[in-house]
Amino acid sequence: MDGKKLEYKGEEALKEIERLTMKAAEVQESLLKQILTQNKETEYLNKYMRGETNVTDIAEFKRCVPVISYERIFPYIQRIANGEDSSLITGHPITEMLCSSGTSAGEPKMMPSIAEDLERRTFVYNLIMPIINQYVRDLDEGKTMYLYFVKAEMSTPSGLPARTVLTSYYKSKHFKCRTHDPWNDYTSPDQTILCNDSNQSMHCQLLAGLVHRRQVLRLGAVFASALLRAISFLERNWRHLCEDISTGQLSSFITDPACRSCMSTVLSSPDPRLADEITRICSQKSWKGILCQLWPRAKYIEAVVTGSMAQYVPALKHYSDGKLPLVCTMYASSECYFGVNLKPLCDPSDVVFTLLPNMGYFEFLPLGHNGTLLMDFDEGEQVPIDKLVDLVHVKIGCFYELVVTTFAGLYRYRIGDVLQVVRFYNNAPQVRFICRRNVVISIDTEKTNEEDLHRSVTMAKKLLEPYDALLVEYTSYPDTCSVPGHYVLYWEILHCGTKTEPEAPLDGSVLEECCIAVEEQLDYVYRRCRSNDKSVGPLEIRVVEPGTFDALMDLFISQGASINQYKTPRCIKSKKALKLLKSKVTASFFSPRDPTWAPKMC
């Protein structure tokens, strides 16, 4: 009975996608009218639409309300965080602030959220299995090993919770009080997911996944980087996990009471045979295909593998021996959930997301056409209102920055994501995520833009001056060959000593201090990932021989770049360019594995 009911709901979910995408224009217009009606008394809207006879008129909204970035809305958010009423920006009470991975002045951005937002996010989550069930059958006949984690939350001065969007969902009744669903039967007990200690949470979740290894039908984490961190943890700790299984006793390392309580049920009795099986697999010299060996019934891996996470695709294919499809299901952010992937088994490079017109009111800022990407508008630049394009009027092949209006109080807000329209599904565009605007380098959830990287390097290179040395040029590269990945900076250094003095290499301690100085200037999210989450490794400076960046310019010019317009790329993505840089390295230096500094809290 329950299975039939769930299957019926799945059919209804697919019908709802058809309805929404067929009537995309109508749904968008209706939704914007609802937002304006709900929020018509807010200080923000009345500031721009004062004197208008009909504040809910869409044409007047588009004529009067400006396109903004975070700096324009932040004063309102800060006032609410400090205790002023939600009516500054929204007609419904703000229940929490969602901390995004974007940054402003070194702090996480805080996005307002109302209770209804959880309903909208849950709506998207409930679409995923009906979509996947069209391509992968019988997922209700086993378990799901998804590794989910929360981050410790903070509070605003007024007492509002400040946390990530995923922590918000996992701590909500929508997750904790969900009914049993055979298509989403997780190996991880909820208590292990909700544990704030990431190491204890990881140990328990992997342990539960290993205990149920022959029942697991799919593997995953939210981000590809998180799944690779789990594999790295397993490499270091599989013997301890096998000991827990063999003895039926949880390691004394686990001190969280809720974890100990729920894991006592998972480890109901000693199982030395299972421990021996896992030991044989994990003792192999090569871990190529290890995921398929440990979880032989797994049918696919689910994780975000688009954008900056695409760099982890080769590693995931290595650990699965290329046998498990990499599934990327949805497109979302702290500000709003946007869309779903209707062809989840496609190659990661072919992933496109169908935008759902009931999630928020979407507009698009043109950034290029005919396959050419042009960053026409800087983040702080005033955008002409007439430049924006509605959801149903975007053009195939063109690039856009997504602009969103939400129930929670964001109006014509620039998300910062660059998208390319690939095709339409019914009347809703299907988009490919291209990149974040201004993001130069990223390993995990941190996103470092060119300005922040340049500021950090500018501060660090001052340490060279007492030694008559100058930084000539630099670039960067996200090295993900090891887990966790880390930032690599290629530095060409000019020694400015007199000709009568022999040129001597800088003492290694000076370059190590430069590594530290760069990291100290990077933003809160980077420092948190580096010192607290351990999801980013120590920063590395690789010193290259003189003339390296001239050779780099020659390479790009030989490939068609204009010598008049050439700028050294601040992050290297070309394999040929990276090979050239690596061939010129004369020395490497790292920051300490355990930094003495700690991230500033918001």
Image (cartoon, helix red, strand yellow):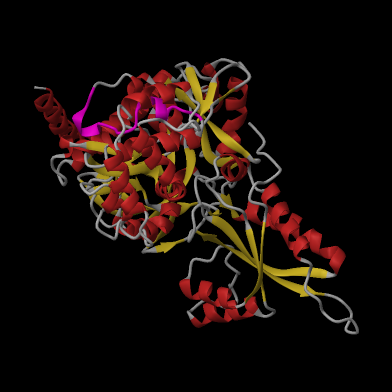
* Residue 155 to residue 545: above or below: above
Residue 399 on image: x %, y %: 40, 55
Q: Is residue 175 left or right of residue 252?
A: left
Q: Which residues are magenta?
A: 180-196
Side of 110 where 250 appears, left or right: left
Name the image quarter holding residue 188: top left
Comparing 530 with 75, the one in front is: 530
Residue found 70% across the figure and 79% down from its top: 546
Q: Position of residue 23 (x, y in %)?
A: 21, 36
Q: Nearer the viewer, residue 233 or 480?
A: 233
Image side of residue 13 versus residue 68, left or right: left
Number of numbered discs on residues: 0
Give the residue displayed 65% in from the left and 48% down from the top: 522
Position of the C terminus, as image quadrant, is: top right
Task: Please provide percent x and percent y for residue 66.
Answer: 52, 37
The image quadrant of residue 390 is top left
- The reply to whether the magenta stretch includes residue 268 is no
**What is the x, y in percent for residue 366?**
43, 52
The answer to if 182 sits in the magenta stretch is yes
**Which quarter of the figure has residue 251?**
top left
Residue shown at the point (32%, 29%) measured from the top left: 266
Q: Is residue 330 visible?
A: no
Residue 87 shows in the view: yes
Q: Nearer the viewer, residue 326 or 433?
A: 326
